[in-house]
Amino acid sequence: MPIYDFKCRKCGNEFEQVVKGDEAPSCPACGAGDTERSFPLSAGVSTTRTRERARAIARARAQAVKKEKDHAHQEYLRKHIEDHS
């Protein structure tokens, strides 16, 4: 059974509860049965904007890795030429 985050509509208390299916528990602070399931901030929503942002971040990281590899390769070639000349 999963643990869900809930918020009481009456007193505003936020709490976690293990529940079955779609049942809504009562608030442990005030006892009201008027609770709603809330989603934690870590739950992300994928939109065109967030996908583009993630793609841009990944592209920037890939460019940095490529630059580092190219630099290392140039160093290797330079040292190889120095050693074998």
Image (tube, rainbow, N blue to C red):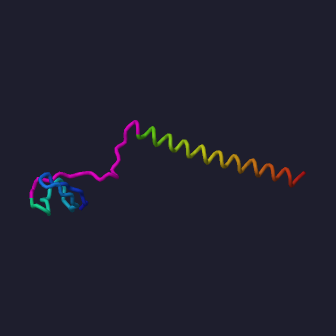
- Looking at the picture, how far across and down is residue 73, in whole percent? 73, 49
> Which residue sits furthest top?
48
Q: Residue furthest left?
A: 32
Most common secondary structure along the magenta stretch: loop
Horizontally, residue 3 falls left or right of residue 51, namely left
Quadrant containing the N terminus is bottom left
Q: Residue 24's x, y, as percent?
A: 14, 55
Find residue 7 and report its image quarter.
bottom left
| Residue 38 in magenta stretch | yes
- Taking the spot 52% from the left edge, 44% from the top edge, the residue there is 58
Please, is residue 50 above or below residue 3 in the view? above
Q: Position of residue 22 (x, y in %)?
A: 17, 53
- Total numbered circles: 0
| Residue 62 percent location from the top left of the image | 57, 45
Magenta region: which residues?
A: 32-49
Membership of 69 in magenta stretch:
no
What residue sits 81% from the left and 53% below the top? 79
Left or right: 59, with 23 as reference point: right
Name the residue at 75% across, 47% down. Answer: 74
